[in-house]
Amino acid sequence: IISYNDMLTTNHIGMLTGVYDRSVIKSIVMKNIGHEDYLFWLETLQVSLEAKGIRVPLAKYRLAKNSLSSNIIKSASWQWIIYRDQLNFSIATSAFYFILYLFNALKKRI
């Protein structure tokens, strides 16, 4: 089970294999802001409160050398914008979650 607070530190749900009930999240749409999928899951969890998953990988995610996701600086800036502009967190709260995000991002790459 993944909660909204769990998702604030890293994206636990891959868009490639995520499934959701449109009747529960009627008005949530992806915004073209960078990390659209992450913001979509955050907004979804604000409505549905939790997500359930399985521990068996359903797909492999390949990170191409020149893809948008591979640009750490751009990804980090998108993350900051989500905390500050989309979720309206204070600078202190944004910094707290941003540090956790960076830690988890580095952990995924090691």
Image: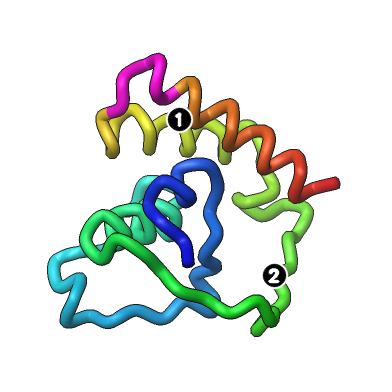
The quadrant in which residue 100 appears is top right
Residue type pointed to by label 1 = Trp
**Could you tell me residue 74's position as x and y percent?**
57, 36
Q: Which residue is mark 1?
A: 80
Residue 68 vertical position relative to residue 45 in the rendered view, above or below: above
- SS type, badge 2: loop
Q: Range of the magenta residues?
A: 89-94
Main SS of residues in magenta = helix
Q: Is residue 39 magenta?
A: no
**Residue type, mark 2 in image:** Tyr
> Residue 61 shows which numbered tag?
2
Q: In the rendered structure, which disc, 2 or 1, sits on the residue that comes first in sequence?
A: 2
Tell whether 20 sits left or right of 52. Answer: left
Task: Please state the horizontal and vertical placement of residue 71, each as a whole percent of the image.
Answer: 67, 42
| Residue found at the very far top of the displayed protein | 92
Horizontal and vertical percent for residue 69?
A: 62, 51
| Residue that sits furthest to the front in the current view | 1
